């Protein structure tokens, strides 16, 4: 099960909106959705979490390229929305490696994994990348430095919102 929200910075603080991922089929779709929530081209954070398994942050500042962070690349790559983020960070085509059509939107795979796959470690395979991936400094200017970002687990999105001073705003859309 996923939770996703957009946090848009405004002159009056942060505004949150619940984000339905049903129409998001690519990272471009997610970025377009986040840009539409932007107020005066200010910062927007797209936050995605899958049941404490992993979380991701996509940061947009005006027309700048998005900055992305994923807490656990291996776990994220096994889910459709996480794979969007890890593919971008690893420079992979979404059709390369795992067959994403075999992934359910809840992040579980259909059928049993092939035990032979566990013995192999192809260099371009998303499963070979363990741990955090992406821009560790994407929230540093907002109060979440690299060390804190790396230490987040469990309800990481609430911890980020707490540091940003918008816990109530995020919880209102949860």
Image (cartoon, rainbow, N blue to C red):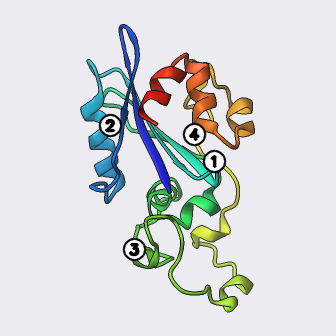
Task: Give the Cα distance between marks 1 and 2.
Answer: 20 Å
Q: Which residue is mark 4?
A: 135
Q: Is residue 120 above or below residue 174?
A: below
Q: Residues within 10 Å of mark 3 (few under 14, many from 20)?
A: few
Task: Give the Cα distance between marks 1 and 4.
Answer: 10 Å
- Identified at 40% across, 74% down, the residue is 95
Sequence-wise, the earlier of marks 2 and 3 is 2
The kind of secondary structure element at disc 1 is loop
Q: Give the mark toward the camera: 1 or 4.
A: 1
The kind of secondary structure element at disc 3 is loop
Q: Is residue 64 above or below residue 92?
A: above
Q: Give the mark toward the camera: 1 or 3.
A: 1
Sequence-wise, the earlier of marks 3 and 4 is 3
The kind of secondary structure element at disc 4 is loop
Q: Are marks 3 and 4 in contact (CB under 8 Å)?
A: no
Q: Which numbered disc covers residue 95?
A: 3
- Identified at 44% across, 44% down, the residue is 4
């Amino acid at each position: 099960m996923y939770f996703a929200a957009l946090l848009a910075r405004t002159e009056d603080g942060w505004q949150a909106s619940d984000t339905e991922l049903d129409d998001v089929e690519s990272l471009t779709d997610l970025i377009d959705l986040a840009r539409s929530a932007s107020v005066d081209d200010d910062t927007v954070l797209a936050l995605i979490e899958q049941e404490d398994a992993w979380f991701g942050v996509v940061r947009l500042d005006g027309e700048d390229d998005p900055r992305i962070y994923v807490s656990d690349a291996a776990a994220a790559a096994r889910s459709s929305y996480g794979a969007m983020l890890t593919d971008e960070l690893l420079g992979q085509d979404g059709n390369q490696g795992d067959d994403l059509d075999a992934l359910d939107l809840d992040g579980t795979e259909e059928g049993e994994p092939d035990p032979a796959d566990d013995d192999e470690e192809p260099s371009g395979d998303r499963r070979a990348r363990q741990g955090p991936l992406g821009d560790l400094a994407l929230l540093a200017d907002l109060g979440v430095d690299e060390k804190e970002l790396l230490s987040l687990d469990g309800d990481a999105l609430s911890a980020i919102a707490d540091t940003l001073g918008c816990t109530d705003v995020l919880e209102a859309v949860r």
